[in-house]
Image (cartoon, grey):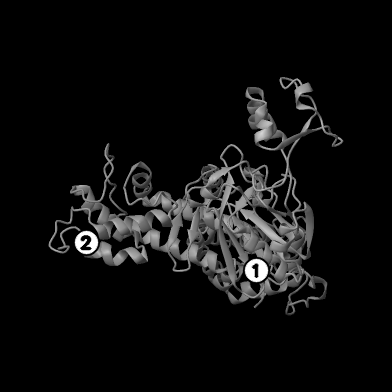
Amino acid sequence: MAILSGVSGIAQAEDPSTGQDDADSVSQAIARLAEEEGVFLQAFYDARGHRPAWHDGETVAAFAAALHTLDSDGLMPQDYQADSLMTTHRQVYAEGDSEGDSEREARFDLHVSRLLLTALAHLQRGKVDPRAIDPDWEIPIEAVELDPVDLSRVVDAQRFEQAFAEARPAYATYERLRSGLARYRTLERLGGWESLSMRQQALRPGDIDDDVALLRERLAIMGEVELMAAAIEAFPGAVLEGRDPRYYDAKLEAAVRRYQRRHLLEGDGIVGPQTLAALNVPVADRIDQIRLNMERARWLLHGLPESFVLVDIAGYRLSYFRPNGEIWRSRIVVGRPYRRTPTLRSEITHMTVNPTWTIPPTILREDVLPAVRRDLGYLWRERIQVLSPSGAPLDPWEIDWSRPGNVVLRQSPGPHNALGELVVRFPNDHMVYLHDTPSQGLFAREQRAASSGCIRVENIGEFAQLLFDDTDSGHDVRAQIDRGETRNVRLAERMPVILHYWTVHPAEDGQLAFRPDIYERDDALLQALDRPLSQQRLGG
C-alpha cells in the first residue's frame, strides 16, 4: 500500500466498481454531493464509482478504533468524532431505503470520508497552520500527499492504522517524541511526581535535608538513563554507603549536573530557583510540551533533503546532516527574546570572508546611536566608519548625532568585527545569517539567547570547510581568510538550511530534554492544538 504517493495518475485510475447499478440512489446522491467537495474527495469517489465507503458498520467501527490511536500522536480523537461515529451510523441506517434515507446516507458517507482525510492530513502536516500563530513563519508547508485509489482500498480492507502509520513523519525524531509521550502518560497514570518544596535556600552538596531524599526519588522517576543507577541506589529508605539518604553526596551532585546539562540549565550541581522550577513542572505540563513539539515536527519533517543544515533555535544547536550520513554539530548563540531569530527555510549560497558589518537599522537605532551620543570615541574604538547612502565617507564631527539623518555605519573587517572572520549567507527577508564572533565566551553558557537575531556558530570555520568539501567547491577556508581581503566565496551547490524552534529534544538514547521556551511560543501553539475543530474545517 502506498497512500502517500501523490495525486498524480487519478485520471488513469481504473473504476473499482463491480457492476454497481448507476441508478442506485445512494451512489447517485454521492456523485451529486461529491461535486460540491474538494478535488481529492471527488477523485476518491470517482475511483470507487461513487460506491458508499461507510455503509458497513464494521468498517466504521474499525475506523473509530483507529481514530483513538491518534492520542499517541498528541492529537485528540474527539476532533475526529471517534466516540460518536457508530452512534451516528446506527441512526443513519435505522430505517429503510427511501429517497430521504439515500440522501442522508450519502451525506454521512462524505462526512466520514472528510474525517479520514482530515486525520491523515493532520498526521502528515499538522493540525495547526503555523502562519496563524507566527506571523513571521516562512517555512513552506507542502501539500498533503494522498492517492485516492489506494485510499479507497484502505477503506475496503479496513487498514486504517496502517494508513496512519504511513502518514506519520518517517523520521527518528518523531518516533522518539511519540515514545516519550507514551512514557510520560504512563508516569501520569502512576501519579506523576511530588513537587519539591519551594525553598529560600538552594540545596547544595553536603546538605542534609528531607528534600534531598525527595530529589533522589524525583530523578529516578524521570527515568534519565544515566541517572538511574545512582538515583535508585539512593532511593528514600535505601542505604547509601552507610549514609542518610537525606545527605547530598557527590554521586547525587553528579546526577544533578547531568540533569542540568541535559535541560540547558546552569550545570553547577546546585538546586537553585531555575533547577527547582524545572524539577517541579507537573507531568501534565510536560505531556503538553511533548504534544506541541510533535506538532512542530509534523510541520517540518517532510520533504527533507538527504543533506541539510538544521538550526535548533531553542536548543542552541546547529546540526549539519552531511551527504556521507555523518552529523556535524555545534553550539550556537541565537536572538534575545526581544530580537528573535526567525523560523525559515532557505539555501546557503556563499560565504563572506573577512566581512565588514553594516549595522542594521534596529541595532543602529537602539544600541549604537545611544553609545555614540554618549561618547563619539565609540566609533574609533569599534572601528566604525560613517558613510553616506552612496558609500562616501563622512566626517563624524560634522554630523548632528541627535538627528543624524540617513547615514550608514559600517564596521571594518578584522578580529574586532562583530561578525568575526566568516559569514555563511542564505537569502531571507529577515537579513539573518550564520556567522563567527569574537565573543567566544558566550558558547560556554547553557542558555545562549544573546544575539540581535543572527546566529553565531562555534567552530564556524570547520563548518564552512565541510560545506565547501561536501559541495566540491574546492576552497580552503583558512587560506581565504588569511588573504585578508573581504570577498564572497560561492558554494558550487546550494545547501538547504532550516531554522526551527523546538522546546523538547529527543536524544538518541530515547530520553527527552525539555528546554526553556525562550520566545514564549508554546502557550499559543498549545491553545491552537487543543482548540476543537469545527465541522466546516474538515478536509476535503
Please provide percent x and percent y for residue 21: 75, 74
Whether residue 360 is situated above or below residue 533 in the rendered picture: above
Residue 153 is at least partly visible in this image: yes
Residue 216 sits in which quadrant? bottom left
Please provide percent x and percent y for residue 245: 17, 56
Q: Which residue is mark 1?
A: 53
Horizontal side of residue 145 vs 227, given as left or right: right
Horizontal side of residue 209 vs 386, given as left or right: left
Q: On the rendered image, what quadrant is the N terminus found in?
A: bottom right
Please provide percent x and percent y for residue 396: 76, 26
Residue 261 sits in which quadrant? bottom left
Residue 351 sits in which quadrant? bottom right
Q: Residue at x 39, y 52 (%)?
A: 267
Given contact means CB atoms under 8 Å apart, are the residues at marks 2 and 1 in contact?
no
Q: Nearer the viewer, mark 2 or mark 1?
A: 2
Q: Which residue is mark 2?
A: 234
Q: How many marks?
A: 2
Q: Residues within 10 Å of mark 1 (few under 14, many from 20)?
A: many
Whether residue 198 is situated above or below residue 38 in the rendered picture: above
Element under disc 2: loop
Q: Amino acid at mark 2?
A: Ala
Query: Which numbered marker is on residue 344?
Result: none
**Mark pair 2, 1: CA separation:** 59 Å
Q: Residue at x 52, y 53 (%)?
A: 315
Q: Residues within 10 Å of mark 2 (few under 14, many from 20)?
A: many
* Residue found farthest to the bottom: 18
Whether residue 406 is situated above or below residue 488 in the rendered picture: above
Q: Amino acid at mark 1?
A: Ala
Element under disc 1: loop
Residue 117 is at least partly visible in this image: no
Please provide percent x and percent y for residue 177: 49, 62
Q: On the rendered image, what quadrant is the C terminus found in?
A: bottom right
